[in-house]
Amino acid sequence: MKGGIKKFQVALVTLLACVCMWGCSEDKVRWHEGFTGAKIVGFVNDSLVMVGSYQQRTESHEGTFEPYWDVIEAGHERLCVYNYRVQENGPRWCDTLGEYNTTNAFRGQMTDSIVWGGDMPNSIRLWKVGETQHLINLKKITEGCSVEFGIGSVKQWLNGTFIARSDESLNAAGDSCQYAVLDTVAKVITYRQLNENLEWIKKCDDVRAWGEDVYCLKFDKEERTSSLFTNDSLGYILENNYFWTAGAILQFQGHILLLERDVCLLENGKIKCFASASSNGISFKNKDENVYITY
């Protein structure tokens, strides 16, 4: 009888231990082999495009009666470079982060070969083609304004710095900050209001600097035209021969101009569009040769 009681006690202790550990077997973590969520994050030049993607993570737990799957997350973000003018078998280069969770690595293109992400304005992650990702912690300063904004765009600016803004910040009123200047060398981001020399960029859908000149892209939804301004002087107007959506994308991406789905270059003061990017998947059309490139 005593032996039976002892065996019962041992079994009870084992059962309680299993319950406390959410099951007697270890939790199983599975990263899907393939990558998903592929999207264009920037253009290196008139031949190479940067594409971001990530893996999904699934956990399996031992339930009371049967195992169950739970907690689907994203991580292991990957940056790849593809040729979008000539069909190739796959990417020219890829690198994958080891982080368990996503780091918002693909928030936008910063220079020809650098993608930015991270927790702006507290820190910024820079991912350069051919290198691993770098994290820079930032000191935040405000000058002449008090209401800050969430940063959605970082582009090259004057004197080796970068302009940071949101979609609406340039037109903010009152004591609101309208833009910020990021100095990656000093590791400082400074929120400011536009002075009289920069007041004109309020009309811009996107803005950046080349050397000492400030360039501005503006879309006119009534005329269906894309206008390029340099230092507030109208330089070129491109008429669009297709219907534009209300939220048309107009962006500087490195040296490339992305006008909705058209991939263009600025040559001798004129905009020349030579390819188009599909809104579904990673595919392009080479306009000069009417060739489709798909990955």
Image (cartoon, rainbow, N blue to C red):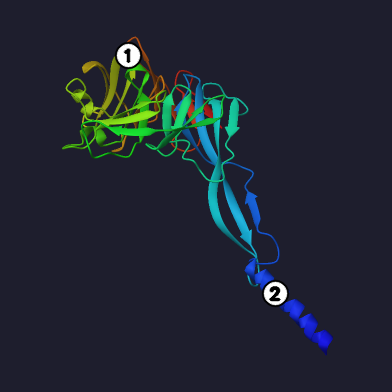
Q: Is residue 289 left or right of residue 92?
A: left
Disc 1 marks which residue? 270
Q: Which mark is residue 159?
A: none
The amino acid on which the numbered mark 1 sits, given as a three-letter code, is Lys
Residue contact at pointers 1 and 2, CB within 8 angstroms: no
Q: Quadrant of residue 123?
A: top left
Q: Residues within 10 Å of mark 2 (few under 14, many from 20)?
A: some
- Quarter of the C terminus within the rendering: top right
Q: Position of residue 58 (x, y in %)?
A: 59, 53
Q: Residues within 10 Å of mark 1 (few under 14, many from 20)?
A: some
- Reply above or below: 26 against 45: below
For the point 22% across and 38% down, the residue is: 146
Q: Residue furthest top?
A: 268
Q: Which mark is residue 15?
A: 2
For the point 57% across and 37% down, the residue is: 97
Q: Quadrant of residue 234?
A: top left
Calculate the distance from the C-alpha at mark 1 to the C-alpha at mark 2. Answer: 76 Å
- Reply above or below: 44 against 39: above
Front one among 281 and 103 = 103
Front one among 242 and 182 = 182
Q: Secondary structure at mark 2?
A: helix
Q: Position of residue 274 (x, y in %)?
A: 42, 20
